Amino acid sequence: MFNLKRAPAALFLVSALFAGSAYAQTVKIAYIDPLSGGMANVGEQGLKQFQFVVDDINKRNLTGGPKLEMVGFDNKLSPQESLNVLKKVIDSGIRVITQGNGSSVAGALIDAVDKHNERNPDKTILYLNYAAVDPDFNNSKCSFWHFRWDANSDMKMEAMTTYMAKDPKIKNVYLINQNYSFGQAVSRAAKELLARKRPDIKIVGDDLHPLAQVKDFAPYVAKMKAANTDVVITGNWGNDMALLIKAAKDAGFQAPFYTYYGGGLGALPSIGEAGEGKVKQITEWHSNIVPNKTEKFANDFNKKYGVPPEYLTFYYLRVNTQMYMLAEAIKQAKSVDPKAIALKLEGMKYQSDTGEVEMRAVDHQLIQPMYISTIARAYGDGKDPKKPKFIGTDKVVKYDVENTGFGFKTDARIEGYVTAQPTSCKMKRP
């Protein structure tokens, strides 16, 4: 028989069980990126890394209850197709999305998510951005529902030009970028920051080309040679990065490339030894940083995927940081509600593998250290002909990329406070 004296406790227990049941549900995360077409290899790499880190989160129960599950959606690198996908995602009940390839896509998603959440406050969507780096997303287009884990393009250019400004041999700089919001932002920031830090440097070329449509970059490289270029700066990624460096190699072009994505998927197999000592990148991590707290995780990923025909190499440390911080936010919130998670994420400080990072509350931009590194020959035990035996103490390039025999060697670490940019964000909060 039901005991009235125990009713409050019983009711509390029932409500707790219901709350626990809701909290323990599986959180599906929609991955919206290209899984077909010319950039499919980049999208597939990202999806595998997300799935790999989610497996680790679930194995260690880092959320304190709910399981995470990645669900891949092909957006064909199209803003319009991404909006169609977002509708399918919403209709399926998924309330967390992640995307990274293409700021044009990201801009469309931010706007659509804001509008949806305003109309549907009980069915809000949380947008986690791991790679789209248009600086407007921290300024005029900032959103409470959008969080970014990659440094924006202005932050990366701040780090890059700080390093470049110290080299007196650089006099003539050529800019080549994809013709959309991100590429345009790279070009603008390069010109502004170089003019401030090294007014003696001349911009001898400033080309913008269609995204993922150029098959032969030889004409662009010919212009670089004719302009007596000392350094090329490019934000190109995917096949546009690989084909650009291949054209430079074929033309015997010797000037160094300062890149955003020189170590991205498919780039090093095309670059090879032509990039040794010449192709640089700006990233939040690479496989030969010291100390390397991601070494075991990266090796486990590479062991699983670093075999033919893929030869994938762990690349996105920020994917790990994003997902571990998401898990921590769910744990702290004791909720899977997007607004509750967002409130825990903003301002969160987290001990990442490269040191403490902070999700800046005012604009939802992660502040983190960055590394400038250069392609260098990887060393091994002498058994692999691509990797000569360690000589003396020269063991800094321990790991290569995509089985090429070449990896990256650190030139400089740029702390987060150096790259952090002011923001004009005036966030509308729910």
Image: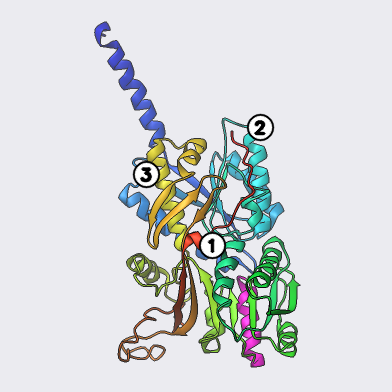
| Type of the residue with mark 3 | Thr
Residue 63's disc number: 3
Left or right of 225? Residue 89 is left
Q: What range of the chain is rendered magenta?
A: 237-252
**Residue neighbourhood size for the residue with mark 1, other residues' Cα within 10 Å, grouped as few (<14), some (14–19), many (≥20):** many
Quick one: SS at disc 3? loop
Q: Are marks 3 and 2 in contact (CB under 8 Å)?
A: no
Q: In the rendered image, which quarter is residue 333 located in?
A: top left
> Is residue 254 visible to us here?
yes
Dot 2: few (<14), some (14–19), or many (≥20) neighbours within 10 Å? few
Numbered circle sitting on residue 119: 2
- Could you say which is closer to the camera, residue 404 or residue 251? 251
Circle 2 — which element? helix
Amino acid at circle 1 = Thr
Residue 181 pos. (x, y %): 70, 60
Whether pointer 1 and pointer 2 mark residues with C-beta atoms closer than 8 Å, the reply is no
Task: Name which of mark 1 and mark 2 comes first in the sequence.
Answer: 2
Q: Identify which residue, 281 or 425, lies in the foreground.
A: 425
**Residue 60, image x and y in percent?**
31, 50
Is residue 256 found left or right of 314 in the rendered image? right
Point out residue 359 in the picture as x, y percentages from the top left corner.
48, 50
Tell me the distance, in whole angstroms, between the alpha carbons under discs 1 and 3.
31 Å
| Residue tagged 1 | 419
Left or right? Give the position of 119 relative to 280: right
Snapshot quadrant of residue 116: top right
In 3D space, how far apart are the residues under numbered discs 1 and 2 (Cα atoms)? 36 Å
| Quadrant of the drawing holding the C terminus | top right
At x 37% / y 41%, what residue is drawn? Answer: 331
> Please, what secondary structure does the residue beneath circle 1 have?
helix
Q: Which SS type dominates the magenta stretch? A: helix
